[in-house]
Image (cartoon, grey):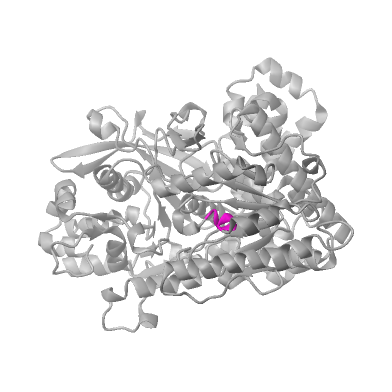
Amino acid sequence: MPYRTSLEEIARNLWWSWNPQASSIFQQIAPELWSPLHHNPLAILRRVSDARLRLAFSDAALRRRLEDALGQLRTYLRADDTWTARHGLALHGHRIAYLCAEFGLHESLPLYSGGLGVLAGDHIKTASDLGLPLVAIGLRYPEGYFRQHINAGGWQEESYPPIPWDDVPATLVERDGQPLRVDIPYRDRHIHAHIWHLAIGRVPLYLLDTDVPGNNADDRSIGGRLYSGDNTTRIRQEIILGIGAVRALRALDIDADIHHLNEGHCAFAALELIRERMDGGQSWEEATLAVRDELLFTTHTPVPAGHDRFPGDLVRTHLTATLDAIPVPEKDLLALGRVDPDDDDEPFCMTVLGLKLASATNGVSRLHGHVTRTMWKDLWPERAVDDVPVGHVTNGIHVETFMHPRLRTLLDDRWPREWQNALLEPYRWARIVEDIPVDELLELKRAMRNDLFHYLRHRAAVEGGVHGLTLGDTHDDHGGDVLTIGFARRFATYKRGAMLFWDRERAVRLFGDADRPMRIIFAGKAHPKDREGKELIQRIINITRDPAFAGRVIFVENYDLAVARALVSGVDVWLNTPRRPREASGTSGQKVNMHAGINASILDGWWVEGHDGTNGFAIGDEEEPEAAEVQDRRDVEALMTVFEQHILPEFHAGDTPGTGEAWVNRMRSSMSTLPPRFSSRRMVADYAQKYYAHLGRGR
């Protein structure tokens, strides 16, 4: 039927994931399926009958919305007046291949674990918005990342339900009626991979799948789960990702002139590119120089322990086919992954491989660029730290993905052709924010806060797993009188998630103040092998059960993009307490700004660049004591002082909490000064102008 055909066209392109007008059509067709199917249009379309569609579209308004959404999608896909075209950024006619181990696109597709994946998803969505000639490649994990469950003892447990790939808008790439196959050399054999295609707006995302006929059982299971298994599983996945990505591009007849390696997981691609050129007759020196000219390497990891390292024997065993195919001494090849090329006992590091073979390397914030230069200075012993060739592009977020529909409606109604472009012009964006009347801004914030608690109550009733939520709390229905804090991210110990409770006596006073009430909402997962991270979650679960904090500390299980969108739009304050300088960038707080939320953060990652004294709160200063315990003591004192002397007094000033002049000015400053500087439009534009436009010119 015609409605199904039109709906299918929309559902098959993840453009709907950042267009609420399009996705809301599917929600209206089957509202009872929307949450259980993780807000997935294709899953809904596969479950509703033609009769139900005819009934739904007997509504003329819904028919008009469908026609309008379909028109928007088609116009978007064929538009040639893109940012890239307007800025004359021809990129020398080259195409960019963007490689990453994970992509956070939508909660219905759990191919991400945290910030790296969400950043990668935002990058390719924005490349589509800007019209960049980019293609993305990753792995198709049958089970993806784990679902989190907190047991009765407060301990995180993991499960890996299979991703329902029939509900994913992915298409198996075929040629002559058969699946297109990539053969990846591995030890004494080849591992076969099929290629799946997903449309992310204008950008194609290709996922390599080894669960195919012709592979043995061990090889079929290589890509089963994201970031699980031992070193052997990890290196096998990274061989498929790196070497397989290059071979997939060839099989797809895609001539990528620029390869952007997003983290070290995909760095084996550089070796495959060198092998190709040497097979074509180039010398080692010629091939290495040519490949360097087309490689950009982005590192996200600010601590030495976070970089993938493999014993030399493991690399020799699993990368034998590639090492043998490059006519260079094995010692020289393995030296590419070692800081000291003469130390045969040094593990092979994927980050070192990327640093040595890419002509351009960047960290993901200004501070992280400095940390990276310091960390890897030994690779350039003749240079001062500031001269180490590592730059930075500060991360940003895809605004449309995380923007609350209420805010989107306001902007679309009043500035329909201006607000998105204004994200690249801070002055224009600030004028838009200043033109929103105070009463309207406050009402918008109240409504978004209420929506957050409606979401939490619904989630608690349908799925469970919302710890500490008092369903009958009337404050939750009115939203304006309780300061609401958010803390949601991966539970690594350096992020110090429970810092607000380290001084229990002061925490009890803060949360027990009846005249200045506040609450905090936590969400996040610990890596399955991170016992300390799990202990931290357990401590927070126990705090939700502590009578001293009853109804004021909440933990939401199974943090995903849906939880993130609800939290970042509804909270008043976003808390971030990493041990500086271990936060490479951190993007969760960037999602709060456009919703008139306020950051309270250690001066780490992006916040060092964003904080100006008027648009949020700094916890502590930029000094970094050598001893972690000294830093912890100073930071917890600074944190409690900020809440006691600044956040709570400002929020609760005046007759109505959250509406005092100082607080409103801070809300407006956060909303006007930060989104343009920390949007992925600015980020991808930086990559294009700073790196992409200058790579691949040697071809």
* Residue 626 image-quadrant placement: bottom left
As drawn, the residue found furthest toward the front would be 505
Measuring 22% from the left and 59% from the top, which residue is drawn there? Answer: 348
Measuring 35% from the left and 41% from the top, which residue is drawn there? Answer: 228
The quarter of the rendered structure image containing the C terminus is bottom left
* Residue 282 image-quadrant placement: bottom left
Nearer the observer, 374 or 188: 374
- Residue 283 vertical position relative to residue 397 in the rendered view, above or below: below
Is residue 523 inside the magenta stretch? no
Nearer the observer, 67 or 487: 487
Left or right of residue 504, residue 663 in this image: right
Nearer the observer, 538 or 581: 538
Measuring 53% from the left and 51% from the top, which residue is drawn there? Answer: 489
Left or right of residue 127, residue 675 in this image: right
The quarter of the rendered structure image containing the N terminus is top right
Nearer the observer, 54 or 208: 208
Q: Could you say where residue 126 lies in the image, as x and y percent from the top left? A: 56, 55
Res. 693 in view: no
- Residue 681 vertical position relative to residue 470 in the rendered view, above or below: below
Q: How many marks?
A: 0
As drawn, the residue found furthest toward the top would be 51
The stretch in magenta equals 497-502
Measuring 42% from the left and 43% from the top, which residue is drawn there? Answer: 206
Res. 449 in view: yes
Q: Could you say where residue 673 lies in the image, as x and y percent from the top left? A: 69, 69
- Residue 222 vertical position relative to residue 687 in the rendered view, above or below: above
Q: Could you say where residue 373 lies in the image, as x and y percent from the top left? A: 37, 74
Q: Could you say where residue 339 lies in the image, as x and y percent from the top left? A: 23, 69
